[in-house]
């Protein structure tokens, strides 16, 4: 008996979502060189060779970091409330939990909990990429 096409597509979407984060991490580590020039190395170098310019470097580095934070938060007025920070942090886990529950209910009760193919593929891709990102070692 041949395997139905939707099951093959489901398997492909899940496998691609599962394999994509580790493959991306491998390619990034293998062919994109890591930067050796860090602020800490520069400070160590300056401390050993020209200690008189170290305070200016530290001050300039602090101003640079502050400018980066301001640019990153340019659309945020003031400090966001803790509830907003928590909601932003919870979006991906909520989508994964809802997707797992919806897919489970759809598999046990297909007539009561119908799901479109696009929604099913979205759930599978998000869940698989989350599991795939867990395979990547830091």
Image (cartoon, rainbow, N blue to C red):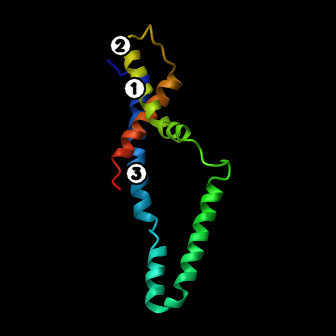
Left or right: where does residue 95 sit relative to residue 104? right
In this orientation, which residue lies closer to the viewer: 5 or 83? 83
3D distance between C-alphas at marks 1 and 2: 12 Å
Identify whether 6 is placed above or below 66. Answer: above
Disc 3 and disc 1 in contact, CB within 8 angstroms:
no
The numbered dot on residue 100 is: 1
Q: Which mark is residue 89?
A: none
Q: Whole-percent x and y of residue 9?
A: 44, 29
Up-down relation of residue 32 to residue 41 (above or below): above
Q: Position of residue 22 (x, y in %)?
A: 38, 50
Q: Point out residue 17 in the picture as x, y percentages from the top left corner.
A: 42, 39
First in sequence: mark 3 or mark 1?
3
- Residue plotted at (56% across, 39% down): 84
Above or below: residue 59 compared with residue 126: below
Residue for point 55% across, 87% down:
53
Residue 10 in sight here? yes
The local secondary structure at tag 3 comes to helix
Image height of 49 relative to 31, above or below: below
For the question of whether residue 37 can be seen, the reply is no
Q: Quadrant of the N terminus?
A: top left
Task: Measure how far apart labels 3 and 1 are at the Cα level.
Answer: 24 Å
Disc number for residue 23: 3
Q: Which of the two marks, 2 or 3, is nearer to us in this view?
A: 2
Residue occupied by mark 2: 108
């Amino acid at each position: 008996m041949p395997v139905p096409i939707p099951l093959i597509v489901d398997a492909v979407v899940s496998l691609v979502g599962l394999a994509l984060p580790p493959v991306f991490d491998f390619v990034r580590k293998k062919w994109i060189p890591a930067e050796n020039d860090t602020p800490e190395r520069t400070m160590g170098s300056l401390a050993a060779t020209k200690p008189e310019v170290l305070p200016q470097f530290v001050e300039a580095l602090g101003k640079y970091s502050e400018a980066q934070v301001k640019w990153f938060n340019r659309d945020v007025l003031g400090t966001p409330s803790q509830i907003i920070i928590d909601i932003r942090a919870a979006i991906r886990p909520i989508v994964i939990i809802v997707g797992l529950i919806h897919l489970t209910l759809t598999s046990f009760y297909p007539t009561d909990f119908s799901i479109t193919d696009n929604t099913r593929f979205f759930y599978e891709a998000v869940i698989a990429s989350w599991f795939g990102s867990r395979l990547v070692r830091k």
